[in-house]
Amino acid sequence: MGIGRGAEERGRTPALGGSIDPRDHPDVAAAVAALGDEVISPYYLWCLQDGFVARAHEEALGVLPWTVNEPSDLDAVREAGVDGPVTDYPDRVALPRPA
């Protein structure tokens, strides 16, 4: 799981570090927030686990799951409350824009 915005100010390169292994951190959202990051980008199936997105939002994290390509999966992550999906087919996404 990658780190989000803010990593470069703290001297980390987002593409190279900051990964969180859920086997080592049962509360992934708290671990990501403790790093000082603002976004969590998990595999999309994690977002379908009961409470995952809500827990991330409690930590003030944006949730941008990857790679969500099937229309039914896009519907499911939308219903789970993600902030936006990473997809190979952006024309399939109809998430509401924040006000």
Image (spheres, grey):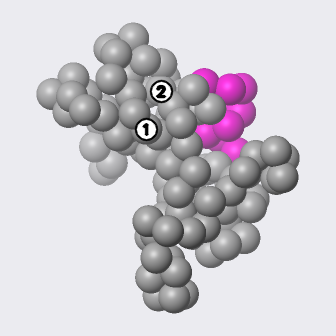
Q: Which residue is mark 1?
A: 66
How many numbered markers are drawn? 2
The disc label shown at residue 77, or none: 2
Q: Secondary structure at mark 1?
A: loop
Name which residue lies at 31% across and 50% down: 99
Can the viewer see residue 1? yes
Name which residue lies at 51% across and 31% down: 44
Magenta highlight on residue 50: yes
- Percent x, y for residue 25? 82, 53
Name which residue lies at 62% across and 75% down: 36
Q: Nearer the viewer, mark 1 or mark 2?
A: 1
Q: State the extent of the magenta-drawn residues as a range.
A: 48-55
Labels 1 and 2: the sequence-earlier one: 1
Which residue, as the protein is rendered here, is positioned at the far front?
16
Specify the amino acid type for callout 2. Answer: Val
Write down the quadrant of residue 15 in the picture.
Answer: bottom left
Specify the amino acid type for callout 1. Answer: Trp
Magenta highlight on residue 29: no
Write down the quadrant of residue 88 in the picture.
Answer: top left
In-front residue for pair 64/81? 64
Alpha-carbon distance for marks 1 and 2? 10 Å
Left of 97 or right of it: where is 40?
Answer: right
